[in-house]
Amino acid sequence: MRSQTPRAHLAIAVLLGVPFCALWPALADDAATSEPPQRPSIQFNRWHEDWSVLANPRVSHDAFDDLKYIPLSSDDPKTYLSLGANLRERFEANDAAGFGIGRARSDDYVISRLEAHADLRIASQVQIFTQFVSAFAPWKTLIAPVDRDRFDLEQAFVALTEPVGDGTLKLRIGRQQFAFDLQRFVSVRDGPNVRQSYDAAWADYEIGPWRLISFYSQPVQNRDLRALDDYSSGQLTYGGARIERQLSETSSVALYYSRFNQDNARFVAAAGNELRNIVDARYSGTGGGFDWDAEAMYQTGRIGNQKIDAWAFGTIGGYTFPNVAMSPRIGLQFDGASGDDNPHDHTLGTFNPLFPNGYYLTLAGYTGYVNFIHLKPSVTIHPTSALKIVFAAAAQWRETTADAVYTQPNLPIAGTAGHPGRYTGTYGQIRVDYAMTSYSSVALEVVHFAAADAIRRAGGHDSNYVGLEYKWGW
């Protein structure tokens, strides 16, 4: 009999009746001669939203906007408090997680996440952002650290924005979430139930087409023994420096160096304290109907008494037919990551995907960004402006048969390392995204993975995944 995790997500609304135009009469004169600004959209990172536009009396207002914008100064509309929340509910059916190796039955469950935040702004210079999370996984038989976090502090940071010279300096310190590019290797990890936070110090200087970033972090680890017990420590650290340049309105390049440290790390062919020096380069852009994103990463360092020599790359490109019905896009994704081709040469070649986001491959978790070559053509259509449908099929190989087949994020499948069979399988994917309103959406993802002999010899078989998701943001 299934056991259901109890939960209660309560929303309390307190209506405040402060007339904005009474606080700032000058706004009425400005509104008469200019177009009113648009309401901000609900963003992936909620701390990017600026709700001070609600000070303008001509901006449309929704229910509970008196909680989205609580003015704190009669002189400066940029000094305010904003409250908000996110809800995500996803049903997942997976008939063979890990290709059924070590699992006797399928798993059907719900992952449920509620986030609530408060965003304090002071004169466009100081921001204090706090966000709590409550995440559960009813009916899930095997609970991983990314599945459940009953109540904890997800983000709590102070940010300062100041003009320096001809540019702008942004400083951020505290528990926060950040990601790079398409989140192949450094992500917020939004696919699973518990997002990845970092206890970090972040500095960002923007001048003209340039952006310079430096950061140091201790990634937050979920313990979930009691409320508010997530932690970070010097046993797991990640930091570095990054430079970006905008080449044109639609293209950019980025290069960064980072350093990853992890105590007591374990791989198929090595174990011990892990230190990786990482260089990453990326080029992306759009133009003439084409879009492209190419990234490469190289890792060196040591784990225990072994050297590290690993690499990975990821490319996505496509062409959109704008004058054709439903604006079809033909895409091609080509990715690769090294494995360890000799377990006895005192050099570990297994790539560490760091903090990957499952969305980049599939939500099913059948494909890890380790020891693999991945080729994925796709077709995307937009039957309406609010509806997007993606059809994709992918083939997958091991980079070397000396290393294992991996599932997300970097979990080796027992019985595959050192066994023949470079080809690991083919999968098909259908994903449907529908924006119901400006603050709610639904999505459906279906994946079928046809396992090849390398997996079947280890006791695995074909796998099927269905995910049905609802998102709401306020």
Image (tube, grey):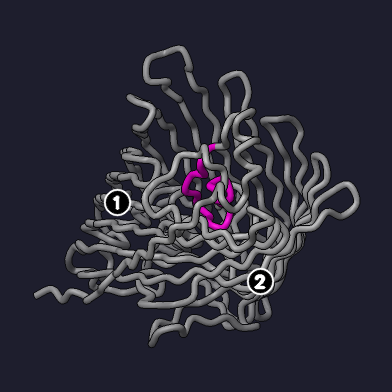
Q: What percent of the width, then of the height, locates residue 69?
A: 51, 56
Instruction: Give the residue at x 49% y 32%.
Output: 332
Task: Say if the magenta span includes residue 378.
Answer: no
- In the image, residue 83 sits, relative to residue 208, either above or below, namely below
Does the image show residue 351? Answer: no
For this orientation, the residue located farthest to the top is 323
Q: Compare marks 1 and 2 and give the one earlier in the sequence.
A: 2
Instruction: Give the residue at x 29% y 51%.
Output: 469
- In the image, residue 75 sits, relative to residue 201, either above or below, namely above
Quarter of the image for residue 301 reads bottom right
Tag 1 residue: 469
Instruction: Give the residue at x 45% y 71%.
Output: 132
Instruction: Indicate the amino acid at tag 2.
Output: Ala
Task: Say if the magenta span includes residue 41.
Answer: yes
Q: What percent of the width, then of the height, locates residue 200?
A: 66, 71
Instruction: Give the residue at x 64% y 32%.
Output: 285
For this orientation, the residue located farthest to the right is 165
Mark 1 Cα-neighbour bin, 10 Å: few <14, some 14–19, many ≥20: some
Gap in Å between the C-alphas at discs 1 and 2?
31 Å
- In the image, residue 237 sits, relative to residue 182, either above or below, namely below
Mark 2 Cα-neighbour bin, 10 Å: few <14, some 14–19, many ≥20: many
Instruction: Indicate the amino acid at tag 1.
Output: Glu
Numbered mark located on residue 200 in the image = 2
- In the image, residue 70 sits, relative to residue 393, either above or below, namely below
Task: Answer with left or right where residue 303 lies relative to residue 40.
Answer: right
Q: What percent of the width, then of the height, locates residue 85?
A: 41, 60
Task: Answer with left or right where residue 474 lies relative to residue 206.
Answer: left
In magenta, the rendered stretch is: 38-54
Front residue of 34 and 229: 34
